[in-house]
Amino acid sequence: MRSDFPLFPEQASTVAPYVDALYLFLVGITGLVSLLIWIAVFYFAIKYRRRPENELAEEIEPPQMLEIAWTVIPAIIFVGIFVAGAWVYFHINRVPDDALDIYATGRQWMWKFQHPSGQREINTLHVPVNRPIRITMASEDVIHSLWFPVFRVKADVLPNRYRTMWFEATKTGRFHIFCAEYCGTQHSGMIGWVEVMEPTAYQRWLAGGAEGSLASQGEKLFQKYACHTCHTNEATGRGPILAGLYGKQIQLTNNSRVLADDNYLRESILNPQAKIAAGFQPIMPTFQGQVNEEELIKLLAYIRSMPAAAPVVAPPTASAGPAATQNKGTVQ
Ligand code: CUA
């Protein structure tokens, strides 16, 4: 029936039924109240119409129970809407811990997606079904908004900072992606498809033609931009040790502390003077204009993949292992 009269897009994520239920409840309750108001307007207009020319209005005292009722009932409804809305809001905003990471870059006028395994795609996104997916997003130019109507999630994609959103698809198939923020003359063409696949089909798709994992591509960039000459992973290096840095609190020269998350690392690459780690000189040059969004994501993936303990000695993963040794070899 829905396909004959598509008032709503399909529900294809775990949150979609809740978003729709909240929406329908709001539409239902506002419709009902509007109807009651209009009925009351007509009923009272007729019942209390002025008959003799000289009739005067009579003052009446409404029953107390009636006043209590019209205060308490709407209060209960409003609190109910708040509780349901807050529940859906927190559900949409709290990313499950086991989410699969995917990176999205918006630019005039296309969507670029990167998978941790190194796969890249434009205007199409392949994801597995029944698995939470976290999308980390940034824009290369203006504000865009990544919208998956069937998943009922949408988030603005901003220049100069990362935002995340998540969904868990419940149906396989091919669904629309739209840009939902006016971003220039080709805004309406900034569209794409999300392909929700069975996990085995997704694995097969991932296996085809990647240029190495994001972290290993990031490691190559780390060498290319000569990051490793200062960030040597030894206490004597001119830059802070990056291994195990991700997710830690960093002491800054101005005595404040900052969490080493994606946004902090991004800022430290593009605008190194903004926050200087305690014990270091502000000597790092900016990489603004040299490193693009896709490369930033690779560099961050590499920094995240660095081992937490015993820098350099233990290779973090199979893919980064050989290069970590190579890294040691090339320093000095
Ligand atoms: Cu991008 Cu509209």
Image (cartoon, rainbow, N blue to C red):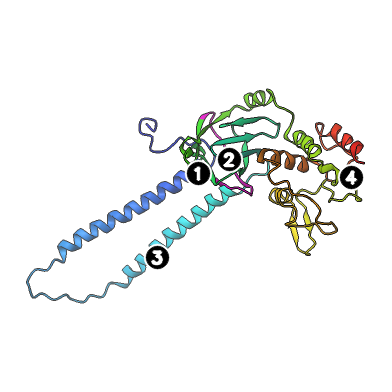
Give the CA distance from mark 2 to mark 4.
37 Å
Name the residue at 41% across, 38% down. 8
Q: Amino acid at mark 3?
A: Val
Tag on residue 183? Answer: 1
* Magenta stretch bounds: 155-174
Q: Position of residue 167 (x, y in %)?
A: 58, 40
Q: Amino acid at mark 2?
A: Gly
Circle 4 residue = 310
Q: Secondary structure at mark 2?
A: strand
Under 8 Å from ligand 1: the CB of mark 1? yes
Tag on residue 106? Answer: 2
Q: Position of residue 52 (x, y in %)?
A: 7, 71
Circle 3 residue = 72
Q: Amino acid at mark 4?
A: Ala
- Mark 2 or mark 3: whose residue is earlier in sequence: 3
Q: Nearer the viewer, residue 96 or 143?
A: 143
Under 8 Å from ligand 1: the CB of mark 2? yes
Side of 235 relative to 125 (left or right): right
